Image (cartoon, rainbow, N blue to C red):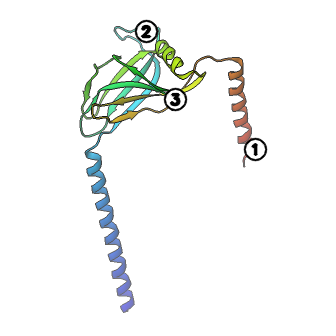
């Protein structure tokens, strides 16, 4: 009988300790997340329609910035990062829904865009290769940087690049059939 009481009291103490640690961790995480920026950046290639000042027949790089954090975030500059080692292409005054620098309050978004062909010419000069990955990067005055996911860009599609891409897809199909 005494052993059962000792086991029950030990388990109760263990559950209480685990609960206390979990609550302390969640409180600390909430406090840490409340005081930092949460910004999401998205880079896409679009054709914009019915936008004043933009030719609707030309393709544009669209950079979407959303502030999901509790504190305001100031967008100081926007750039397109070219590859891992090639450098960055600064966009000095992009067209968009806001002017640079702009402050985004909580749950506010803004869009910026730049001409696709002009950006690709500059990126091709920086990269020096046929295929490269790019991503959008934004930063504020304090140096906080946020970036989008990598977006693959192919400049000139030759017969050999198309053939290699097709062989890679066939290889993937074959591996799916062979694997158990």
The x, y position of residue 44, in whole percent, is 46, 24
Residue in the picture at 35% in, 80% down: 10
Q: For the residues marked 3 and 1, what is the alpha-carbon distance in whole angstroms?
A: 34 Å
Which is closer to the viewer, label 3 or label 2? 3
Left or right, 43 with respect to 107, comes to right
Residue in the picture at 32% in, 71% down: 17
In the image, residue 14 sits, relative to residue 125, either above or below, namely below
In the image, residue 93 sits, relative to residue 72, either above or below, namely above
Q: Residue furthest bottom?
A: 1
Residue located beneath label 2 in the image: 56
Q: For the residues marked 3 and 2, what is the alpha-carbon distance in whole angstroms?
A: 29 Å
Decide: marks 2, 1 in contact (CB < 8 A)? no
Decide: marks 3, 2 in contact (CB < 8 A)? no
Q: Residue 110 appears in which quarter of the rendering?
A: top left
Residue in the picture at 34% in, 9% down: 52
- Residue 83 has which mark? 3
Lower sequence index among marks 3 and 2:
2
In the image, residue 34 sits, relative to residue 11, either above or below, namely above
Label 3 crowd bin: few (<14), some (14–19), many (20+), radius 10 Å: some
- Name the element at disc 3: loop
- Name the element at disc 2: loop
The x, y position of residue 20, in whole percent, is 29, 66
Which is closer to the viewer, label 3 or label 1? 3
Residue in the picture at 39% in, 90% down: 3
Label 2 crowd bin: few (<14), some (14–19), many (20+), radius 10 Å: few
- Name the element at disc 1: helix
Residue located beneath label 1 in the image: 178
Q: For the residues marked 2 and 1, what is the alpha-carbon distance in whole angstroms?
A: 47 Å
The x, y position of residue 119, in whole percent, is 47, 16
């Amino acid at each position: 009988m005494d052993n059962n009481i000792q086991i029950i009291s030990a388990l109760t103490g263990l559950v209480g300790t685990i609960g206390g640690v979990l609550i302390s961790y969640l409180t600390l995480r909430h406090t840490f997340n409340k005081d930092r920026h949460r910004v999401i950046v998205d880079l896409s290639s679009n054709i914009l329609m019915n936008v004043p000042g933009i030719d609707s027949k030309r393709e544009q790089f669209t950079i979407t910035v959303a502030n999901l954090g509790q504190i305001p975030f100031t967008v100081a500059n926007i750039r397109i990062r070219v590859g891992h080692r090639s450098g960055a292409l600064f966009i000095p005054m992009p067209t968009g829904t806001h002017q640079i620098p702009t402050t985004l309050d909580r749950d506010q978004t803004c869009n910026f865009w730049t001409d696709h062909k002009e950006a690709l010419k500059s990126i091709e000069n920086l990269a020096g290769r046929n295929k490269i990955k790019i991503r959008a990067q934004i930063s504020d005055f304090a140096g906080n940087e946020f970036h989008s996911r990598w977006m693959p860009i192919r400049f000139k599609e030759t017969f050999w690049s198309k053939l290699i891409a097709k062989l890679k897809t066939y290889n993937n199909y074959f591996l799916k059939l062979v694997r158990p």
